[in-house]
Amino acid sequence: MKPAADSDREHAFHSLFQAETIRRVHRWLGKLRVPARDRRDLSQDVFLAAVVSFGNYDPSRGSVARWLNGLAVNLASHYHAKASRRNEAITDPAELCKAGGGATAIELLLAAERRRLLRSVVLELPFELRSVLFQHDLYEISMRDIAAMREIPLSTVYKWRARALHGAQEALARRVAAEEEPRRSPTLAPAGGGR
C-alpha cells in the first residue's frame, strides 16, 4: 500500500471516534426511524462493525463518512427486520378479514409472493443503489438528506435511485421471462417417430 493511502486510512480510522462522527451516526439512525430508546445500542453496533470491517475500507472509493453511512443503513435495515423489534398487536381474526378488504386467501398469498419477489430483486442491486432506494422509498428520507448523510452531490443520489429503479425493472423482467420460457418451449415428440 502507498504511504499516502496508509495516511488516509489512519486519518479515517481516527475520525471514526470523533464526537461529531458519533453525533452524525446517531442522527442518521434517527432518520432511519430507529426509536430513540435503541439508537445508542445501534450506534455501538455501527462502530463495532466499522472497527471489525475497517480492513475493507478503501479511501479511494469515498469518504469514511459515506462508508460509515452504508454500515448504518445496513444495520438499521436488519434492526427493522428483526421479529423481536416488531410491535404487533393481537387482532381478532374477524377484524383481520375486514382489514384485508375482503381479499381471499389466494389474493393475500399472491400479494405476499409479489412482495417476496420484489425484495429479492432489489437485493440483487449493488449496495449503493439498493441503500438509496431503501432510504428514500422505504424509510421516506428526503433525497437532500441522503446526499448530506453520504456527503455526495444531490444529483448523484437522484442518478443512483434512477439506476436502482431501472435495474430492479430489468431484473424483474428477466425473472418473468425465465418463468414463462418453460411454458413457451414446444414439447418434443418421442424418439422413433412411430406411424
Image: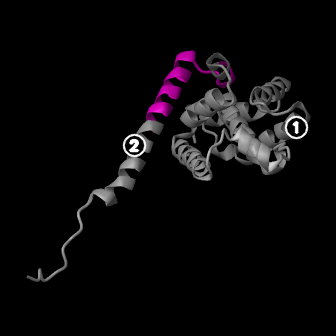
Q: Distance between the residues labelled 1 and 2?
A: 39 Å
Q: Give the range drawn in magenta.
A: 148-167
Q: Position of residue 129 (x, y in %)?
A: 54, 34
Q: Residue at x 78, y 40 (%)?
A: 46
Mark toward the start of the polypeptide (1 vs 2):
1
Q: What element carries label 2?
A: helix
Label 1, residues with CA under 10 Å away: few <14, some 14-19, many ≥20: few
Q: Dot 2 corresponds to which residue?
A: 173
Going by the numbered disc 1, the residue's amino acid type is Asp
In the drawing, does residue 31 fall left or right of residue 161?
A: right
Q: Where is residue 146 in the image (x, y as percent from the top left)?
A: 65, 23
Q: Nearer the viewer, residue 80 or 45?
A: 80
Q: Dot 1 corresponds to which residue?
A: 38
- Residue 171, by quadrant, is top left
Majority secondary structure in the magenta region: helix
Going by the numbered disc 2, the residue's amino acid type is Ala
Q: Position of residue 186 (x, y in %)?
A: 23, 63
Check the image and report above or below for 145 versus 22: above
Q: Is residue 49 something that shows in the picture?
A: no
- Residue 77, by quadrant, is top right
